[in-house]
Every structure is written in C-alpha cells, then in structure tokens.
Amino acid sequence: MKGHRKQWKRTAALFLGSQCITLLGSTLVQMAVVWYVTLATSSGMWVGAFSVCSYLPQFLISFPGGAWADRCSRKALIAGADALTAGVTFLMILAMPYMKTDTVMLTCLLVMSALRSVGAGIQTPAVNAVIPQIVPKEELMRYNGMNAVMQSLVQFAAPAAAGTLLSFGSLRDTLFVDIITAAVGIGIVLCLPFPKEQGDLPYTGKSGTADSVLEDIRKGIRYAVSNSEIGKLLVIYSGFVFLSVPAGYLAGLLVSRVFGNGYGYLTAVEVTGFAGMVLGGVIMNVCGRFSRQFSRWRQGGRGDILLTAGLIVFGAMAVGMSLTGEFLLYLGQMFVYGIALTIVQTSITTKLQEKTELSMQGRVFGLMSSAYSGFMPLGMLVFGAMADKMPLQWIMAGAGTGLVAMGVRAAFSGGTRDDAK
C-alpha cells in the first residue's frame, strides 16, 4: 500500500513538473511575441489580431481535442501537442533570418500563434483528463491546489524572464527557450508510468462500430447537458470567465486611468495579483490534505461552500476595486481577488474531475477549455468596447455584482449528495 502511495505521488509530482516546465516556455513565447508586436507596430489592430489567433483556434479545436482525449492515448496527445508547438516555433526560428520586412515577420508570427493555439486546444483537455488517472479521488483537490501554486509562480516569473531575454537578446533567442522546455517536458511525460488509458482500448459505440469524432463531440455535449451537476459547473465557469475580464484583464487600463501610467503601478498590480493566486493555491492544497474530513462540509445539499465563497468574495473585490481611489487599498483588494480566483478555478476543476466518468473526462474538459478560450476574448471585446464609452469603474461594479449573484445562486441551487455515501 505504501509502495502504491509513493508511486502515484512520484508520478503526479513528475507530471506536474513537466507541465510547469512547458508552461514556462509557452508563457515566455506568448509574452515575448505580444511585446514585440506592441513595440514594433503600436497598432491596436495587430494586437487584436494576435489575441484572436491566440484563442480562436484553441476554442475551435478543443471540441475534437476533448474527443481525441477519450479515444486516443492521452500521454501521446500531451507529448504530441507539445511537439507540435515546439516544431512550429523551431520552423519560425529557422525562417526568421530570411524575413526582410516587418509585414512578413508579423504575418508569420500570426500564423505561429494560431498553430500554437491549436496545440493548446489539443493538450489542455488531455492534461485535465489524465489527472484523475494518476491521482486518487480524495487527493484531487490537494493536487489541483499545488498545480495552481506552481502555475501562478510560473506566470509570475515569466514576465521578468521574458523582459530579461528580450533586453539582452532577441526575439529569436527567446523562442529557443520554448524548444528546450518542450523537449524536457516531453521527455518526462513519455517516461511516466500512466495507468491503462481509455485510448488504449478498442473504441466502439453501442453498435460495435467506431464512432466518428463528430459523434463523440455530440455525445460529450449531451452528457454535459444531461448531467445537471456537470452542466451547472460549466455554465458557472463560462460566466465566471466572462465577468472576470473587467477587474482582471482590464486592470492595467483602470490603473492607468485612475492612479497613473507608470510601470511601477502596473508591476505592483501584477505582482500582488499573482501573490494572491499563489496563496489561494496553498489554501486549496491545505484543504485537500483534509479532503475526507472536509468533504461533508465542502459538498452538501446547499452546494459547494468553497466555490460559493470564492465567487462572492471575487465579485465583492471587483466592486471594491471599482470604488476605491487609494492605491494601497486597491492592491489589498487585488490580493484577495487573486486568492478567490484560484479558489473558484480549483474548485470547479476538482469537482468536474470527481463527477465526470473517466471515459468522458476528455470531452468535458474540452468543453471547459472551449469556454475559457471563447468567453475570455468575448469579454475583452465586449467590455473593452464598453470601456471606451463609459467609466470602467461602472463596468467593474456591474460585473462584480453579477459574480456575487452567481455565488448566491450557487449557494441555494442545491448540491450533490453522492459524496456522502
């Protein structure tokens, strides 16, 4: 028993490490490309085009990507998606010396971003679906909490690393980092002893014949809609992503309008937000350590208390940040905002992993990935346009109120009782 426990812990730790390594490379490239385009063009049109290319392909491919995660080897999909993004980046590195004009360079970077987005759409559902295979159910919250901590630390370090590499090198040098991190991550994943996967078995439908990917997608959507718990979580997540845009992704715009345009203000906000996200992951990890004793309190007839509290606090902080004119108070609220953000994300991910059948994990997380890559840019488009017509504080307050209402609604919508068996 102890040997089995050590085995899953070692596998889970190595898998977490591999994903953090590849995330560092991917985040570095994404930031470096956006900064390069911003400085080279100062064009909102080009920046907007890169935003579309970074999210639209992921949104579209997440549907079949989730189906592939349920019919193919998830290990192969994860490694293959990393190899795809690294290969595209490597081709860009080889071609860059021959690009003589900025237009050619920007167009090729646009294509590279789109293809890398395809890789993310394939990889993300497979990563989330493979976690319940290697982590015991009672340890999922603890693992997801640690995963949130590591991802927040990577995202915290990536801007500084990207800025340093671009300051002392070139965009081409920065792209090389992604090749190295992808190679390390792929090597670790391929060596891990995953349990037997759904994709390792003959994949047939009820009639005994192989289903098409399109039919798999339909089955996944029907499964999510017919399961009230899973459907509710996906709806909450979609609304959460959309309504988090004003206070989160448009925070820099608010700071520049209210407190000043200095880089010191923007840096302080980013650092504070990521620090809160790290602490939020620590809190979820601690809760996961006592998951068995905590489960009856965490999940009951009146919904998930952690998820409910996270949504209400998240929304309340958004409203508070819209009202304050003191920068230190704003930073304090941003810190709590980051904690609540991680609690909501981790709670939803953990509950989906617990409630979804193993054979449907890929498709459900494909829907979750498509919700993020669809509603986040939609929120940027809608709220960004509104921010040019009315005070951003009004928008933040409205979105925050909506998040609080979602939390209250979740508290009284009824929960699941199947955990209290």
Image: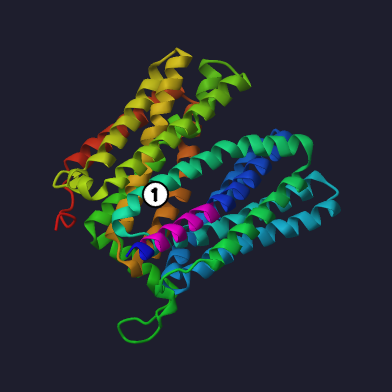
Name the image quarter holding residue 213: bottom left
How dense is the environment of label 1, judged by Cα within 10 Å: few (below 14), some, or many (20 and up)?
Answer: many
Q: Residue at x 51, y 66 (%)?
A: 192
Name the image quarter holding residue 227: bottom left
Q: Is residue 308 above or below residue 140?
A: above
Residue closer to the observer: 279 or 260: 279
Callout 1 amino acid: Asn
Secondary structure mostly taken by the magenta-highlighted segment of the chain = helix
Question: Residue 111 location in percent, x, y?
Answer: 67, 55
Can residue 409 be seen at all in this image of the molecule? yes
Question: Residue 252 location in percent, x, y?
Answer: 54, 27
Looking at the rendering, in which quadrant would you find the N terminus?
bottom left
Looking at the rendering, in which quadrant would you find the C terminus?
bottom left
How many marks the image carries: the answer is 1
Residue closer to the observer: 116 or 388: 116
First to last magenta residue range: 5-19
